[in-house]
Amino acid sequence: MKQPSPTTPARPILDARQLGVPKMMILGLQHMFAMFGATILVPIIVSSQYGLPLSIQTTLFFAGIGTLFFHVCSKFQVPAFLGSSFAFLGGFEMVSKLDSGIYAGMTAQDKLSYACGGILVAGLLYLVLALVVKLAGVKRVMRFLPPVVTGPIIICIGLTLAPSAVNNASMCWPLALVALAVIVIFNIWGRGMFKIIPILLGVVISYLAALLMNAVGITNVDGSAILDFTSVAQAGYLGLPPFQLAKFDLTAILVMAPIAIATMMEHIGDMSAISATVGENFVEDPGLHRTLIGDGLATSLSALLGGPANTTYGENTGVLVLSKVHDPRVIRLAAVYAIVLSFIPKMASVIGSMPTAIVGGVSFILYGMISAIGVRNIVENKVDFTNSRNLIIAAVILVCGLGFSSGLTFTVAGTSITLTGLALAAIAGVALNAILPGKDYDFGVNPTGDQNRGIHQ
């Protein structure tokens, strides 16, 4: 029997049970490692830079619970993992700096509660958009999001993450290159199980390399140790996540809630990306309204008890591309692992000790894959860039998404509101598509492209 060449695409695995339980559990670990670095980075930044005590344990718990809740809402069909959202970091920073009115002299713990109250309201805004989608119909809504809009937005999702991959990798380039090389080698030349777990192998082998480099005295470029087990030694073996109830104030709500504009647009882009990756019709079945409800309620539930906002994770979409295992059961296994880890502080600290450079090396592949999916979205839908209208829309989306790296901040009723670059890109793209004459894309003309984006005529 003729063996496929290393570059021959493997047939996607839709039911991982055919691989057996041990292999399924390993695949779940791969997804957990893919999301872990970015997910715990949110509470690390919020606590260390903004002084708000957002817990890693609570974050992991609600990443897992939120993912399972999302799968229930989306009828167990969508292979998406929900991790903590970076879009709300600016909001956390603003709330941490509030010092007038009730916020004067307020403890950091209470400020976090009010920030979570604002996030809870932001999550509920997803339900409003879900209702609009349900009443108007997904086809009418998606007519405002043709591939000339969604393609560049998906490209921006990957490219806006790219600087963080480079920054992380630059801490120790040799280690990052080990992670990158292992992933490439096993993904291209690997056989059997090794071919579908390149991310996990990249993490494990590069971690072993880090242990060796650390033992011989090699350090990061800033002189810090490649591995630091201080937090591991201090962490306990068992412990409940430190939950706390959200509190509500109009000022914090006005800071946090508008960020939902950005995350809802990112959600639609991620659903398009996952649909394009898996080749299913998730926007129509189980339906965009269901995925919005799942994401929004997962965010509100997390915020209610002191966790960050959730969002669909591009890293895990990248894993779907590389592994070609599209079974949502594997994602749910990763969610269970995250929940279990949230009750084992020491184990969470061990995984959290993963060198920044390894996260950077892995991200090189994952973030690039997301942008490549955006390019694929444009190509498969045959977007005509000889048409000046399409060029203008794509150009404005790309510049907004990449140019506003710090977002755009403006004041409403004395409160500062920040829209992220991705939110601005989505708003500009949708507006230009609606305003500019000469639309050259009709749903139903290219059924394959429509189906790739989850739309049927």
Image: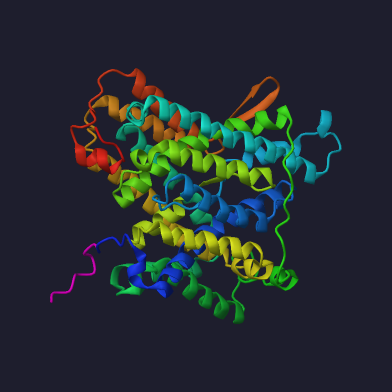
The mark tally for this picture is 0
Percent x, y of residue 433: 34, 24
> Is 9 rendered above or below residue 50?
below
Left or right of 353 on screen, residue 157: left
* Residue 404 seen from this side: no
Which quadrant of the view contains residue 337?
bottom right
Residue name at image x 23 percent, y 43 percent:
380
Toward the viewer: 243 or 408? Answer: 243
Instruction: Say which residue appears at 52% left-offset and 33% top-offset.
Output: 127
Along the viewing direction, whichever of 6 and 142 lies nearer the viewer: 142
- On the image, which quarter does residue 220 sit in? bottom right
Q: Position of residue 238 (x, y in %)?
A: 71, 69
Q: In the displayed image of the protein, which residue is found farthest to the left?
A: 1
Q: Which colour style is shown?
A: rainbow
Picture quadrant where residue 328 is located: bottom left
In the depicted structure, whether residue 307 falls above or below residue 180:
above
Residue in front for this viewpoint, 210 or 81? 81
Q: Is residue 6 magenta?
A: yes
Q: Position of residue 106 (x, y in %)?
A: 84, 39
Q: Which residues are magenta?
A: 1-9
Q: Quadrant of the C terminus?
A: top left
Residue nearest the viewer, comparing 76 with 436: 76
Quarter of the image that includes the N terminus: bottom left
Q: Is 427 contained in the magenta span? A: no
Tell me where residue 325 appears, x and y as whole percent: 35, 61
Above or below for 399 versus 161 = above
Is residue 256 something that shows in the picture? yes
Left or right: residue 312 compared with residue 215 = left
Q: Residue at 33% across / 51% down in the picture?
A: 277
Q: Main secondary structure of the magenta part?
A: loop
